[in-house]
Image (cartoon, rainbow, N blue to C red):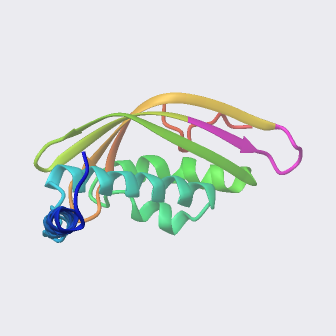
Amino acid sequence: MFYSRKQQGKNSGLLTKWILLFALFFLSACASDPKRASPIVTQVGEIQKSLKHLSKAYEKRDESAFFKTLDADSKLLDALKDGIKRDFERFTVVTLSFVIDHIVIKENVSQTTLRWQGRWTLPSSSEAIEKRGKVIFSWVNRDHPKLTEIRGDSPFGSLPRP
């Protein structure tokens, strides 16, 4: 079909108006307020941060940072203290990784089911002890979750004595 220049001008102007209208609609949709994360998503993120902080403090053998992640009111602190100190004195290099399998969040507490694997290197040799296991960490929900209980194969302070 052939159009005269007059008809092409009308069609092209109409097309331009539709494109501008579409662009305006698209840009206004993008400019809306961002949605806030739900409290559960926020809590999961905080648990992940605490878990990462815990493992990094353990790998760096930073006793102060490690124990700050534990709830001061729980019995866990006393139970881990000797084993953690022994680990920090005994091993020169520690690598530890966690994979979260499941998280249960309740009003005041949360539980994470984890798989972990670690490698502990002795200073006197290049030999390393490798272990893996499954564990459930219980957290008290605060601004930053604090570890209150460890059930299962704990990666912390549980290696056999020399």
Q: Is residue 88 above or below residue 138?
A: below
Q: What residue do we see at 29% from left, 57% from top? A: 145
Say which residue appears at 10% left-offset and 48% top-offset: 107
Report the residue that reaches farthest toward the right: 125
In this rendering, is residue 137 above or below 101? below
On whether residue 142 falls in the magenta region, the answer is no
**Looking at the picture, how far across and down is residue 58, in whole percent?**
57, 55
Residue 51 % position (x, y): 42, 51
Looking at the image, residue 152 sits to the left or right of residue 110; the answer is right
The reply to whether the magenta stretch includes residue 118 is yes
Farthest left residue?
Answer: 107
Q: Is residue 58 left or right of residue 139?
A: right
Is residue 60 shown left or right of residue 14?
Answer: right
Q: Position of residue 59 (x, y in %)?
A: 62, 55
Quadrant location of the N terminus in the rendered image:
top left
Image quarter (top left, top right, bottom left or bottom right) of the C terminus? top right
Camera-nearest residue between 1 and 153: 1
In the rendered image, which quarter is residue 32 located in? bottom left
Q: Is residue 35 left or right of residue 57?
A: left
Q: How many marks?
A: 0
Q: Residue at x 78, y 38 (%)?
A: 128
Q: Where 41 falls versus 131 (above or below)?
A: below
Magenta residue span: 117-127
Q: Is residue 50 visible?
A: yes
Taking the spot 58% from the left edge, 65% from the top edge, the residue there is 62
Q: Position of residue 91 (x, y in %)?
A: 73, 50
Q: Nearer the viewer, residue 34 or 65?
A: 34
Does residue 152 appear anywhere in the picture?
no
The residue nearer to you, when weighing 99 against 132, is: 99
